Image (tube, grey):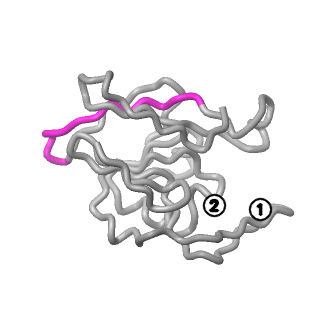
Amino acid sequence: MRITLIGGPTALVEINGLRLLTDPTFDAAGSEYARGQVVLRKTDGPVCGSKDLEPIDAVLLSHNQHADNLDDSGRAFLFRVRQVFTTEVGAQRLGGNAVGLAPWETEKFASADGIAALQITATSARHGPPGIEPGAGDVVGFAVAPAGRPGEAVYISGDTVW
């Protein structure tokens, strides 16, 4: 397994012959995202562009309602991967290739040729203290392991402080 930090919440996870990307954010430094009275300003850009990372087999998206975890360029990138794993409500919003997972739900994901496979399990996550969920929205983390080898799992916390 190899993990490469791309920037912010975005990392390339190479495991069991598959390439996964976490929370894709590829907008340039200086980008701004207004959300009510709050304006997020991106201070650093990614170390490379999305095209430099292709092919990507799947995206592990902790949530899709905040631009610091899925910015405009990252959202466009989602359509260039085979599968996006995210929250149940996030999958409903995104449609297409998105699969929604409830906490502790597991999906098997195989390479296009069927040779390599992973077990992807959504884990409980929370943006902040108990009760914040109605304002912050749903979020998940992930435990990813080669199929049949759960002891080799890597935990990806997602956007959580829990």
Q: Which residue is mark 2?
A: 67
Task: Please report the bounds of the magenta region as a residue range.
Answer: 112-124
Q: Is residue 126 left or right of residue 100?
A: right
Are discs 2 and 1 less than 8 Å apart at CB? yes
Q: Quadrant of the N terminus?
A: top left
| CA–CA distance in space, label 2 to label 1 | 9 Å
Tell me the crowding category of disc 2: few under 14, some 14 to 19, or many 20 or more residues within 10 angstroms, Cα based.
many
Q: Position of residue 49 (x, y in %)?
A: 41, 72
Q: Which residue type carries mark 2?
A: Ala
* Horizontal side of residue 109 vs 128, given as left or right: left
Rendered residue at 26%/32% (across/down): 146
Label 1: state its secondary structure.
strand
Ranked by sequence position, the earlier of labels 2 and 1 is: 1
Of residues 68 and 11, which is closer to you in this image?
11
Can you give x and y, in whole percent of width and height, for residue 46 in the image? 49, 68
State the image quarter where residue 92 is shown.
Answer: top right
At label 1, the amino acid type is Arg
* Residue visible at 50% across and 62% down in the picture: 7
Q: Which quadrant holds the C terminus? A: top right
Q: Residue at x 18, y 39 (%)?
A: 116
Which quadrant of the structure image shows residue 136?
top right
Left-right relation of 75 to 149:
right
Tag shown at residue 35:
1
Whole-percent x and y of residue 13?
35, 48
- Front in this rendered view, residue 95 or 45: 45
| Residue 91 within the segment the image draws in magenta | no
Q: Residue 118: within the magenta? A: yes
